[in-house]
Image: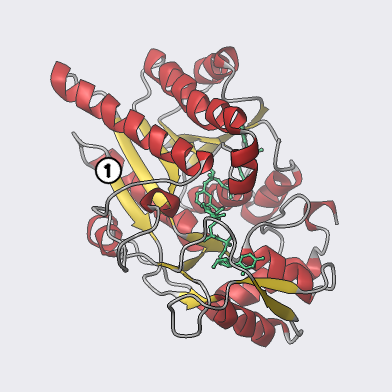
């Protein structure tokens, strides 16, 4: 298949480019480079030995999308393009709704006009809000606490409405998949690609990695009094290449099955690790100390969040195969050989 990858220069999108190319698919990347650089795509070419078109433009630009769909025969779209910083979304909600929600609406309109029906959307475990228990299945109630999460849930609801309208009209046009990611970490095993956050990282793993490499002094562990075995927050960390391979499986599923409902899959490992377990695992992989101090809880954080990934296993034949040690070793290989990310 020839797949349009919006946000394909970013962290998860670029790793998914590799997984798709390695499975023999063709790709066209569309990215406005607002949070990424073309170097990631040069690395994709270096690793896979394959070339592909790259369009630098914005998903809110309908004319740009029309021209891509006219010039390239696209079979499916993977939609990664979006903004993802929770704190920023609280300060700039309009920017988040414009980029994440309006961007997806415009993309869907363009797809419909060009009769492209298969879309895989990057959602997040954030749509489960503060879950009543763990592990989290796809049937758990949905709620959000910030504009970023709200933008993901709004898009999910829009996609469900598209399917419902198909069913009402009996047209069966759309083939839609929603992937709810848990906490993506790690990097490609080559050490050539990984996560390259701008400024001070918000997320745990890039922060730990930058402390280990000496760029930051110490980690603040947000909260030591959660009702968890060691009092620290617990998350389901998943290797970015496992996540990428989940997208390829979802694409296969949608191309083989004529679905009449929006398909939703959790992409997680089913294992939860605490912040301290993550620090210890990173120290073991890097042989570098990661100094930390316990500080107060971060507003909006929940105690624990980990997936029941059995639906993806059952329906997609997908299971995360890389363990915590591999996640840490790969993250460290990337960070230590590219201390300034792609601008190293
Ligand atoms: P990222 O910022 O590395 O990648 C997003 C890419 O989209 C970037 O290359 C950026 O330049 C591009 N982009 C943003 N707005 C755009 C627009 N309007 N038009 C064109 N390109 C645009 O983020 P990521 O971690 O790779 O995340 C990819 C997707 O997965 C996002 O939608 C994010 O919300 C979602 N997600 C990420 C995580 C995570 O922890 N990384 C977790 C759950 C969901
Ligand atoms: C965060 C977002 C979530 C988003 C996800 C991926 C919040 C509240 N949630 O999830 O919506 O989908 O990123 O972008 O921002 N931690 C520390 N010190 C740090 C950083 C994190 O102790 O410097 C802890 C957190 O309290 C948490 C764990 O590490 O327990 C993971 O944090 P993080 O990587 O930010 O991911 P989430 O909070 O799960």
Residue plotted at (65% across, 87% down): 284
Whether 70 is drawn above or below 164: the answer is above
Residue plotted at (66% across, 83% down): 285
Q: How is the image coloured?
A: secondary structure
Count of numbered circles in the view: 1
Horizontal and vertical percent position of residue 122: 46, 44
Horizontal and vertical percent position of residue 169: 16, 16
Q: Quadrant of residue 200?
A: bottom right
Whether 127 is drawn above or below 279: the answer is above
Residue plotted at (25% across, 42% down): 256
Q: Which residue is at the front of the view, 85 or 23?
A: 85
Q: Secondary structure at mark 1?
A: strand
Residue bearing mark 1: 263
- Specify whether residue 164 is in view: yes
Quadrant for the C terminus, please: bottom right
Label 1 near ligand 1 (CB < 8 Å): no
Whether 125 is drawn above or below 135: the answer is above
Quadrant for the N terminus, please: top left
Q: Is residue 211 left or right of residue 283?
A: right
Residue plotted at (77% across, 76% down): 212
- Specify whether residue 333 is in view: no
């Amino acid at each position: 298949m020839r797949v349009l990858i919006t946000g394909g220069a970013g962290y998860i999108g670029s790793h998914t480019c590799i997984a798709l190319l390695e499975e023999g698919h063709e790709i066209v990347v569309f990215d406005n480079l607002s949070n990424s650089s073309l170097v990631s795509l040069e690395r994709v070419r270096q690793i896979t030995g394959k070339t592909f078109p790259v369009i630098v433009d914005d998903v809110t630009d309908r004319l740009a999308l029309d021209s891509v769909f006219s010039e390239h025969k696209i079979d499916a779209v993977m939609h990664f393009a979006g903004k993802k910083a929770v704190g920023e979304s609280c300060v700039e909600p309009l920017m988040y709704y414009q980029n994440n929600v309006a961007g997806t609406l415009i993309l869907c309109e363009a797809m419909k006009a060009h009769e492209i029906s298969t879309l895989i959307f990057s959602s997040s475990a954030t749509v489960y809000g503060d879950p009543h228990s763990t592990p989290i299945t796809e049937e758990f109630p949905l709620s959000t606490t910030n504009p970023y999460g709200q933008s993901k849930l709004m898009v999910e609801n829009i996609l469900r409405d598209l399917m419902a309208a198909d069913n009402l009209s009996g047209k069966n046009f759309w083939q839609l998949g929603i992937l709810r990611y848990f906490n993506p970490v790690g990097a490609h095993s080559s050490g050539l690609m990984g996560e390259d956050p701008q400024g001070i990282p918000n997320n745990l793993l890039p922060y730990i990695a930058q402390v280990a490499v000496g760029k930051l002094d110490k980690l603040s562990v947000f909260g030591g009094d959660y009702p968890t075995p060691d009092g620290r927050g617990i998350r389901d960390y998943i290797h970015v290449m496992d996540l990428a391979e989940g997208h390829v499986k979802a694409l296969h599923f949608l191309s083989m099955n004529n679905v009449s409902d929006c398909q939703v899959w959790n992409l997680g490992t089913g294992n939860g690790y605490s912040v301290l377990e993550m620090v210890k695992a990173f120290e073991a992989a890097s042989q570098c100390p990661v100094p930390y101090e316990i500080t107060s809880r971060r507003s909006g954080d929940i105690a624990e969040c980990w997936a029941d990934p059995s639906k993806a296993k059952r329906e997609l034949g997908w299971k995360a195969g890389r363990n915590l040690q591999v996640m840490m070793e790969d993250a460290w290989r990337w960070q230590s050989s590219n201390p300034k990310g792609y601008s190293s």
